[in-house]
Amino acid sequence: MTKHMLLFFLVVGGFNTCYGQSDYDETLSKMHDTKLIKKDIIEEIKINGQVVSALITEGDTLIFANLGNVNVSSPRTFQSRADYLRYLKYRRYAAKVYPYAKQSIRIFREAEHVTNTMKKRKRKKYLRKLSKELQKEFEVPLKKLSKTQGKILVKMIERELETPMFDLIKMTQGKLKAFYWNQSSKLYGYRLKHGYVLGQNEILDVVLQDFDISHDIHQ
């Protein structure tokens, strides 16, 4: 990728991040209308299996990219140095568990979509199979998390789904499993029935605002 290609990629992506997809499309339309870009030189090309729009001119290729959202926040202020240090610790821990939370939401949304039209028995069978597969993949890395890291992971998921972890377990694995994990988790200071409550931990509230783990199913 040449410097001009990289610059165009970043500018278009940054514009789309700040103003949204509709503004991005409108800008491209205006560029067409003002003849800054000729329609006959915009092509669809495939990069790593993904089809993207590209402007091909004078032997150079400029890629139009729709980047994900970026959260921009004002500098934080804290009442004490202890609060500031706790914020830094939570930020560090949230960054560590973020990939697991992101993937958990993606899997949950996709499973929710797939099982939406299934009968109850078939749905349970599908979820049991999925649970076993996920256990093999994530059991070892999740066991390495500290107690606080695990709590932040749980709160991330509860905040996104607006549902206590107890209800999520009951929904996907049944009442007995939910009861078992609720009782067991109390030994480590978890309260799976409580869910995420805004204002209960103001430092954590601030941290979680900066981590987007949402996932949309495109039909």
Image (cartoon, rainbow, N blue to C red):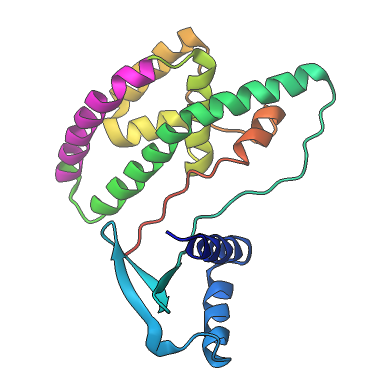
Query: What residue is shown at x 19% (from left), y 33% (from top)?
Result: 128
**Residue 191 visible in rendering:** no
Viewer-side residue, 16 vs 114: 16
Q: Mainly helix, strand or loop, the magenta region?
A: helix
On whether residue 138 falls in the magenta region, the answer is yes
Query: What residue is shown at x 41% (from left), y 55% (from top)?
Result: 216
Q: Is residue 47 left or right of residue 130?
A: right
Quadrant into which the C terminus falls: bottom left
Give the residues drawn in magenta, as a range: 122-143
| Among the 4 quarters of the image, the one containing residue 207 | top right
Viewer-side residue, 83 vs 185: 83
Query: What residue is shown at x 68% (from left), y 35% (from top)?
Result: 206
| Among the 4 quarters of the image, the one containing residue 124 | top left
Q: Residue furthest right?
A: 79
Q: Residue furthest top?
A: 187
Query: What residue is shown at x 47% (from left), y 36% (from top)?
Result: 157
In the rendered view, tell whether residue 112 sits above or below residue 159: below
Quadrant into which the N terminus falls: bottom left
In the rendered view, tell whether residue 22 sits above or below residue 132: below
Q: What percent of the width, then of the height, locates residue 147? A: 50, 14
| Among the 4 quarters of the image, the one containing residue 172 | top left
On whether residue 41 falls in the magenta region, the answer is no
Viewer-side residue, 81 vs 200: 81
